[in-house]
Amino acid sequence: MELLIVLSVVAFLAILTVVAGIKTVPQGQQWTVERFGRYTGLLQPGLNLIVPFIDQIGHKINIQEQVLDIPEQDVITQDNAVVRADGIVYYRVFNATKAAYEVANVENAIASLAMTNLRAVIGSLTLDESLSGREKINASLLQVLDGATESWGVKITRVELRNIQPPENLVRAMNLQMTAERERRAQIAKAQGDREAQITRAEGEKQAQILEAEGRKEAAFRDAEARERLAEAEAKAVQMVAEAADKGGPQAIQYFIADKYVAAFKEMATNPNSRLVIVPTEMSGLAGLAGVALESLRAMQPPAPTPGSASANPWARG
């Protein structure tokens, strides 16, 4: 019976020793080993063996990239405007030993350092620069925090300014200013549009006047050319009449006048749109003119050959 109790105690101690000497570290973590309170080594992910009851696990360090919130706080800008700002920090432990023993609480240390530098960076900028210079603020914070945490075995990978909230009265003033600026731009755009429209209309009217003047010029040129051609035709007709009168004598002139007179009277008499008919006082005058024309025509014709002449008898040739 006593032997059974002793064996049971020995087995329990053996199991307890094995459990105390075997440590399984999960992926993404590193554990520090302490012997009587002093750092002796670092356990990597997987199965690890330590001296039971002598070696102890000191710190369990997460070496994955982590996100840390920068608490919201009031910050005074360079032009004495109070804004509320917060952000986030991405960091990763690259040296678990330093992160465990160089700083008491790495997360609190990073958060405090980020808050302090956030106030310093925004305090060196004006309100407009703070609201529009997020990239500049992020770059400055990243440079400062990465340099300060290097001795802690921590790498700052990214810093993002999440929110910058100015006071309500300042927001209202900014909205009024923005509205006024947009109205000013709209008025300028409208004025420029009206100006361009007036210029376009003036250009159109100018082109129309130019085209109209060119049309009048072309029409005047055509009219002058037509009158010139008519004058040439009339001159040629007068020349032909003069030549005929020169060849035919007074009889030709009398015939021409009588013919014109009869044609003019005929046109007036046969015009369906004319309500007025001019009739000579003496109808015998019209008949006399016709007779004069007939006599003038006969006089202009060559004399008829006599019966005994050679021209009357084509066969009478010597």
Image: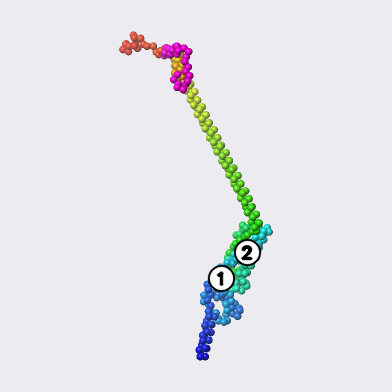
Residue 39 image position (x, y, % from top left): 59, 77
Residue farthest to the right? 80
| Residue at position x 55%, y 35% in the image | 209
Q: Which residue is mark 2?
A: 72
Quarter of the image for residue 133 reads bottom right
Which amino acid, mark 1?
A: Ile
Residue 313 image position (x, y, % from top left): 32, 11
Label 1 Cα crowd, 10 Å radius (few <14 / some 14-19 / many 20+) = some
The quadrant of the image that shows the C terminus is top left
Q: Which residue is mark 1?
A: 63
Quarter of the image for residue 30 reads bottom right
Stretch of the chain drawn in magenta: 269-297
Precedes in sequence: disc 1 or disc 2:
1
Side (left or right) of 140 relative to 314: right
Label 2 Cα crowd, 10 Å radius (few <14 / some 14-19 / many 20+) = some
Residue farthest to the left? 315
Disc 2, SS: strand
Q: Is residue 226 visible?
A: yes
Check the image and report above or below for 170 versus 66.
Answer: above
Check the image and report above or below for 237 versus 210.
Answer: above
